[in-house]
Image (spheres, rainbow, N blue to C red):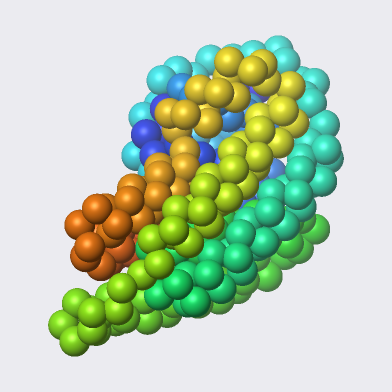
Amino acid sequence: MQKTLFRVDQMDCPSEENLIRMKFDGSAHIKHLEFDLTQRILTIFHESGLDQIESALAELKLGHTMLSSDSTQQTAFDNNKAQKSVLWSVLMINLFFFILEMTFGIVSRSMGLVADSLDMLADSFVYALSLMAVGKSLFHKKTVAKIAGYFQIILALIGFAEVIRRTLFGQEFPDYSTMIIVSLGALIGNGWCLYLLQRSKDSDQAHMKASLIFTSNDIIINLGVILAGLLVYWLGSNIPDLLIGALVFIIVTKGALRILSLGKN
């Protein structure tokens, strides 16, 4: 058996981890996957097919580099069944904050909150796809990935259109206090998800904190919305809210394209 290590530059949160898991689901020559999100290292235990592995990673467009590939005698690996309950937990957390942020985003007229809610929905799609892929055919998995990806893109395009409309024609002033409070809640929710995911791998607190602080795009987005809320208050302008909304819609679209890549032949 071979043990091959890759550095994956854009593997900076559990969403990318689950995309990779989905990509290799059903590959007979893949025996086990290990992830180090802090160092962005992916370890693959496999019997053959290194070229196919590299090709599959290239399709995800996460920026990978092979670090080493050596023979190993290891044949026993941790049981991943416990991951399923954790995935259900983080799925429910993300869905809850999607509904919360979308509702308050509409009520408070904040494009930043609406966009952040779609980022939560994007994570929910990834976790749901990971769970639905278990025991399903490759065709089923690809079909669901396509539906999720296109739905996500449609929502992002609607969001872009609204940002453009408000920029050109509207002066709808968002409720900055709601932006800040709800985003703080989402920040706690993302931190909770990362804690659950890291704890499920028996990682130490230092590893969890490093992943929480340095490697989560979701947390950076939450902080961005909070900052936008403060700028709306200080500047008396809706421009910061529109800018963070547009930026997050771009991130959501990129995530949707990654999901669609799973539906390719």
Residue most extreme to the bottom: 169
Location of residue 140 by image quarter:
bottom right
Quarter of the rendering containing residue 249: bottom left
Q: In this view, does 166 lie above or below 258?
A: below
Q: Can residue 159 be seen in this view?
A: yes
Closest to the observer: 102 or 262? Answer: 102
Q: Residue at x 16, y 82 (%)?
A: 168
From the viewer's perspective, tell me whether residue 253 is left or right of residue 188: left
Q: In which quarter of the image is residue 86?
A: top right
Q: Which residue lies furthest to the left in this view?
A: 168
Question: Is the residue 189 above or below the residue 205 in the image?
Answer: below
Say if 178 sits above or below 1 in the image.
Answer: below
Q: Which of 223 and 70 is in front in this view?
A: 223
Q: Give how far across and how far down residue 134 sits, in percent.
A: 76, 55
Q: Relative to residue 114, is residue 14 depicted above or below? A: above
- 35 or 179, which is in the foreground? 179
Image point 69% across, 49% down: which residue? 90
